[in-house]
Image: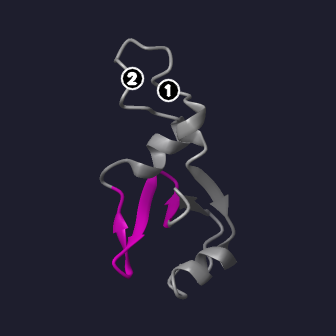
């Protein structure tokens, strides 16, 4: 069932994620699992953990921002086998 408040993402060209409010989930091993590693939010913020803590490039990294793209509900359905 489509949830109008949910946004779907393709991460690194292979991992499907979804975000509803502040709740994020990744589609792994055939099911939706809570994104406990901040995979979605880190990419949406361009967070680069390889940069030093005081670096101005730690957030807003374009290369990290490029790792995530918003996809449609229909595309998410296709990629998750109808479990979006």
x, y percent for residue 49: 36, 31
| Residue beneath the point at 52% across and 35% down | 46
Q: Nearer the viewer, mark 1 or mark 2?
A: 2
User: Based on the displayed image, in which of its 4 quarters is residue 50 positioned?
Assistant: top left
x, y percent for residue 35: 36, 57
Q: Secondary structure at mark 1?
A: loop
Q: Secondary structure at mark 2?
A: loop
User: Based on the displayed image, in which of its 4 quarters is residue 62 positioned?
Assistant: top right
Label 2 crowd (10 A; few <14 / some 14-19 / many >=20): few
Q: Which mark is residue 59?
A: 1
Q: Measured along the vertical axis of the image, is residue 71 above or below residue 73?
A: above
Q: Residue furthest left?
A: 36
Q: Which mark is residue 51?
A: 2
Main SS class of the magenta portion in the image: strand
Q: Nearer the viewer, residue 53 or 41?
A: 53
| Residue beneath the point at 52% across and 56% down | 12
| Residue beneath the point at 57% across and 51% down | 68
How far is the residue under mark 1 from the one under mark 2?
Answer: 9 Å
Q: Quadrant of the C terminus?
A: bottom right
9 drawn magenta: no
Q: Quadrant of the N terminus?
A: bottom right
Q: Residue furthest bottom?
A: 82
- 16 left or right of 72? left
25 drawn magenta: yes
Tell whether label 2 touches label 1 (CB within 8 Å).
no
- 36 left or right of 10? left
Q: Which mark is residue 15?
A: none
Label 1 crowd (10 A; few <14 / some 14-19 / many >=20): some
x, y percent for residue 25: 42, 63
Q: Measured along the vertical axis of the image, is residue 81 above or below residue 49?
A: below
Magenta highlight range: 15-35
- 79 left or right of 34? right
């Amino acid at each position: 069932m489509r949830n109008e408040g949910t946004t779907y993402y393709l991460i690194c060209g292979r991992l499907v994620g979804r975000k509803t409010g502040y709740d994020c989930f990744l589609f792994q091993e055939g099911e939706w699992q809570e994104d406990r590693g901040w995979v979605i939010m880190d990419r949406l913020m361009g967070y680069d953990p390889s940069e030093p803590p005081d670096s101005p490039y730690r957030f807003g990294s374009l290369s990290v921002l490029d790792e995530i793209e918003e996809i449609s509900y229909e595309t998410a359905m296709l990629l998750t086998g109808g479990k979006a």
